[in-house]
Image (spheres, rainbow, N blue to C red):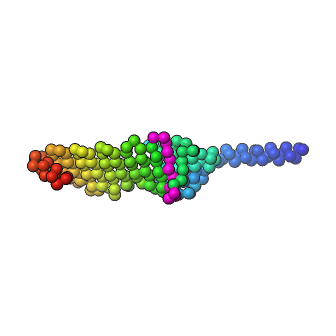
Amino acid sequence: MKTGNFLSAALLLSLGFGACTNDRDGRFLNLATGQEVTLVKSEDGTMVDRATNRPVLLYVDTEKRDTFYGPTGARVNGHLWRSNRGGYVYDDGERKIKIDGDEFKIKGDGAKEKWDADGSEYKYKDDDRKEKLDDGEYKVKTENYEKKKDEDGDVKIKTADKTIKVDGETGEKKVKKRSVFGKVKDKVIGG
């Protein structure tokens, strides 16, 4: 009896010490990669892999057996399913968020968003606005406004009545007023 109590106490004591020294390394599983990761919170509040500093979009806390959505930290148990193509879909009630590897898509409220985890590619579209970032080139388009910025920093803005160009290196700004004939030409051609 004393030997059994002693072994039980020793086992509990060793488990207690193990729990005290256990850090968070390897406790999380990145669902996109299937790899164990160490997570840290970035400046903007999203969870990132400490080794790569890349966002982790879906992860499992293997100790608590809960699944989390990295950008918000929301627990997604029961709101997540695996798609036929191998990615994951998270339904937060208002939107559906699809996560497939490093690609991330959101649909809901009449808008669509898509980006990759490192932020080098981004697309947004709703009834009034389109945005696109691809390899350093950024574009925004609405009904009465267009803006393009290339990887060199050159900016071109087009409104209903003028075109503005800004040189990315020198900061030189050129403004050109658009004539009525230019507007008519745009409408006839479809631009």
Mark yes or no: residue 185 visible.
Answer: yes
Q: Is residue 77 left or right of residue 111?
A: right
Residue shown at 63% from the left, 45% from the top: 64
Q: Tell me where residue 62 appears, x and y as whole percent.
A: 62, 49
**Most common SS among magenta residues:** loop
**85 drawn magenta:** yes
Q: Quadrant of the N terminus?
A: top right
Q: Tell me where residue 23 appears, x and y as whole percent.
A: 61, 48
Mark yes or no: residue 170 visible.
Answer: no
Q: Is residue 99 left or right of residue 151?
A: right
Residue shown at 80% from the left, 44% from the top: 9
Q: Tell me where residue 92 appears, x and y as whole percent.
A: 49, 42
Q: What residue span does the magenta drawing correspond to?
A: 84-94
Choose between 161 and 5: the one closer to the eye: 161
Residue shown at 31% from the left, 48% from the top: 130
Q: Tell me where residue 188 appears, x and y as whole percent.
A: 15, 52
Q: Is residue 23 left or right of residue 128?
A: right
Choose between 47 and 143: the one closer to the eye: 143
Residue shown at 68% from the left, 45% from the top: 19
**157 drawn magenta:** no
